[in-house]
Image (tube, grey):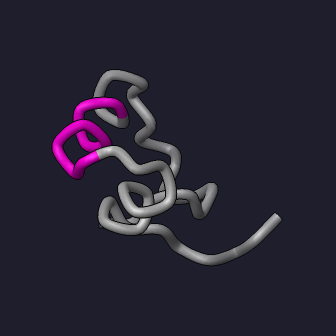
Amino acid sequence: MSKKMYTVADIAKITGYNRSTVTRWLDKQKIKKAHKLGFFSS
């Protein structure tokens, strides 16, 4: 698993979703631990 830290912009680029959709999805999924997992950084 990659240790790269992804920003909302990176996730949006990879998935093709816009930033607000990504932000809303992350908030809905309550991915607060993602910082520790390395999936998301603000």
The quadrant holding residue 42 is bottom left
Tell me which residue sits at (51%, 44%) in the image.
33
State yes or no: residue 29 in magenta. Answer: no
The quadrant holding residue 11 is bottom left
In the rendered view, tell whether residue 30 sits above or below residue 39. Answer: above
Q: Which residue is situated farthest in the bottom direction here?
A: 4
Q: Position of residue 13 (x, y in %)?
A: 40, 63
Tell me which residue sits at (24%, 37%) in the image.
21
The quadrant holding residue 41 is bottom left
The secondary structure making up most of the magenta span is helix
Q: Magenta segment, which residues?
A: 18-25
Tell me which residue sits at (39%, 28%) in the image.
30
Q: Which residue is situated farthest in the right direction here?
A: 1
Residue 26 relative to residue 21: left or right: right
Tell me which residue sits at (34%, 30%) in the image.
25
State the residue in front, 3 or 18: 18
